[in-house]
Amino acid sequence: MKQRLVVLTGAGISAESGIKTFRDTDGLWEGYNVMDVATPEAWDRNPALVQEFYNERRKQVLSAKPNEAHLMLAELEEHFDVQIITQNIDDLHERAGSTNITHLHGIITFSQSDKNAALLYPIKGEEIKMGELCELGSQLRPHVVWFGEAVPMIETAAAICEEANLFMLVGTSLAVYPAAGLIDFVPREVSKYIVDLKIPSVNHYQNVIKIEKSATAGVKEVAKILIKNA
């Protein structure tokens, strides 16, 4: 039986593939106020603008490539039962070869029904067009969890964390809830490797190993430790 390694990834791992986060210093995401493009209210006000915004983000994702951190996490499946929980909406973990991925905030390469979020469709090409409808006759929108919407996969992710034998956090500031609370479900005795350029306060957790490096450098360091100790 392989040990279960649970990995929670955030924007920092995708940033090294050139994908920007909305948490820039100016509070804008690609020049837009996030409240104008990433909320249900924004969709109600101006669906065409929101659709265009995510079509452009999707093009960026599809042109990006998995980096060394993504690839190393996929390679760790040779040694561990790797379960990736990601806050990112890109498909870089999939393209790197990881096979067990839980997307907390959706995945931009899928669309969903505006009427029933459980109706999902793979996007053919790069765009969702206005007038493109689901089987219920409702407009298709990006399969992305917006601010103010429930995070449907959070309970699944919490259950995965509860079963962790090892835990790694990569490229997240632990600032976005409910995702940031997932570390609370990891058993206290489990080793918790925190990889980020600026590690948030985690002093109240037990068995924490801080690695204040980029995602690629930090994951490489953790992988060596884990494989050596396996």
Image (cartoon, helix red, strand yellow):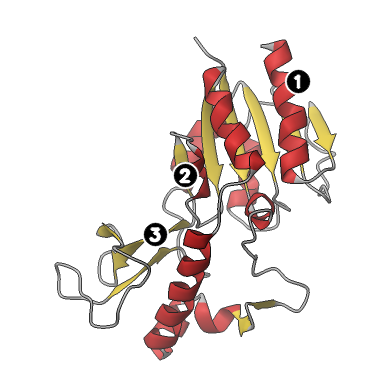
| Image position of 1 with respect to 19: above or below | above
Residue in view at x 78 percent, y 46 percent: 214
Please tell me which of labels 2 and 3 falls first in the chain: 2
Q: Nearer the viewer, residue 168 or 55?
A: 55
Q: In which quarter of the image is the C terminus?
A: top right
Q: Mark 1 points at which residue?
A: 225
Please tell me which of labels 2 and 1 falls first in the chain: 2
Give the crowd class for mark 1: few <14, some 14-19, many >=20 residues within 10 Å: few
Please tell me which of labels 1 and 3 falls first in the chain: 3
Q: How far apart are marks 1 and 3 (CA)?
A: 34 Å
Label 2 residue SS = helix
Identity, as a three-letter code, of the amino acid under mark 1: Ile
Residue in view at x 59 percent, y 50 percent: 179
Label 3 residue SS = strand
Q: Where is residue 208 in the image (x, y as percent from the top left)?
A: 79, 31
Residue in view at x 79 percent, y 26 percent: 207
Q: Name the residue under label 2.
A: 95
Q: Where is residue 74 in the image (x, y as percent from the top left)?
A: 54, 32
Give the crowd class for mark 3: few <14, some 14-19, many >=20 residues within 10 Å: many
Whether residue 146 is visible to the viewer of this picture, yes or no, is: no
In the picture, measured across the screen, residue 196 lies left or right of residue 149, that is right
In the picture, measured across the screen, residue 134 lies left or right of residue 192, that is left
Q: Nearer the viewer, residue 137 or 53?
A: 53
Residue in view at x 76 percent, y 79 percent: 26
Q: Quadrant of residue 110?
A: bottom left
Q: Name the residue under label 3.
A: 109
| Image position of 150 with respect to 217: above or below | below
Number of marks: 3
| Image position of 80 with respect to 193: above or below | above
Label 1 residue SS = helix
The reply to whether dot 1 and dot 3 touch (C-beta < 8 Å) is no
